[in-house]
Amino acid sequence: MSPMVEKTEPSTNHASWDLFVQANRGHLLQLSRWGALKQAFGWRYEVLPAVDQGGQIQSGALLLFRKLPLGLGSIAYIPRGPVADWSNPGQFESLLAAIDKLARQNRSILLKIEPDIADSPANRQQLQVLAFRESVQTVQPPNTIIINLEGPEGDLEGDNDEVLMRMSSSTRRKIRVAYRSGITVREGERGDLDTFCRMMQTTSERNQFGAHSPAYFQTVYDHFVPEHAALLMTSYQDEDVAGLFVFSLGHRSWYFYGASSNTARSLMPTYALQWEAIRWARRRGCLTYDLWGIPDAPEETLEAQFKERSDGLWGVYGFKRGFGGRVYRTVGAWDRVYNPLLYRLYTFFIRRMS
């Protein structure tokens, strides 16, 4: 039986919270520095740990708050959390009561959570029992591909690296093509951000999606590198042609942001870049590498349609699937409603915008 929760209130002891998140296989998006990143761009954050009588954290959440226009209150959001024992309903209900209190203090019309748990009938039922309803809006992609990084490292040319051998033969060939063509990968520095951001703008125009501002990526770098992230840059003949941010926490790693120029694309620089990101994660002791975002569709639909579709995340699925991971879907986004009238207005506008 878990120790009884004695105290649950916002905390400024972020170091203890971050250690708890890592020790309990929590998600990177639950770290206090993720809250600090989002706070620099319009959100406000609170760390809400639940501690037992001995002062040990048992569960908790990083909450983000965003004000609504016209003084209509705010939205409360928990990205990839809370960090709790979902098999212990009593613990979770106690934490949820504290979350409700904090959300109401911030005049939130709803609490949106995107738990870091698998999509299953049992998990959906538990959320419904707790008075959550499936949201019309997701923030983080619910569907992804996760690569197993376990196994001894081997030689790229000799085909004896276990992670490499789980990839498709086409992806292995393209990784080799990149290196044989003179593609090089290095760990970038803050001074490389200008180039990375220019490539990100090129990528967003080519693939028709919105890109974060240069200030955003500068803040990402300052908050996460080198403790939890690296900026990897790929070059050809002394010209940078691609880059990505890779993140790690404990035994888990993630690929969040990637960019490439229109130069040397036929030389497969992004394949070498992902391979080096995987190697970086393995050196840090990570056991999984999350490619972060594929179309939200069942695997059989993905496999049947990816060759014909390029809209949205379909354009990257063909690339990501070759790295030998498994399709994994979280339970998605769920809302807990505090103000039914304003919530109806919120869902109306979300649907109009989508």
Image (spheres, helix red, strand yellow):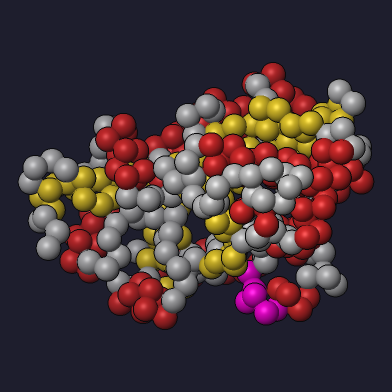
| Residue at horizontal 37 percent and vertical 66 percent from the top | 336
Q: In which quarter of the image is the N terminus?
A: bottom left
Residue 293 in percent (x, y) is at: 63, 58
Magenta part of the protein: which range?
A: 296-301
| Closest to the observer, 60 or 72 | 60
Residue 46 in percent (x, y) is at: 34, 41
Res 246 visible: no
Q: Is residue 187 magenta?
A: no
Q: Is residue 192 left or right of residue 216?
A: right
| Closest to the observer, 137 or 90 | 90
Residue 137 in percent (x, y) is at: 55, 64
| Closest to the observer, 12 or 337 | 12
Res 36 visible: yes
Query: Where 268 falls versus 148 (above or below)?
Result: above
Q: In which quarter of the image is the C terminus?
A: bottom right
Query: Where 81 falls versus 337 (above or below)?
Result: above
Q: Is residue 301 left or right of residue 103?
A: right
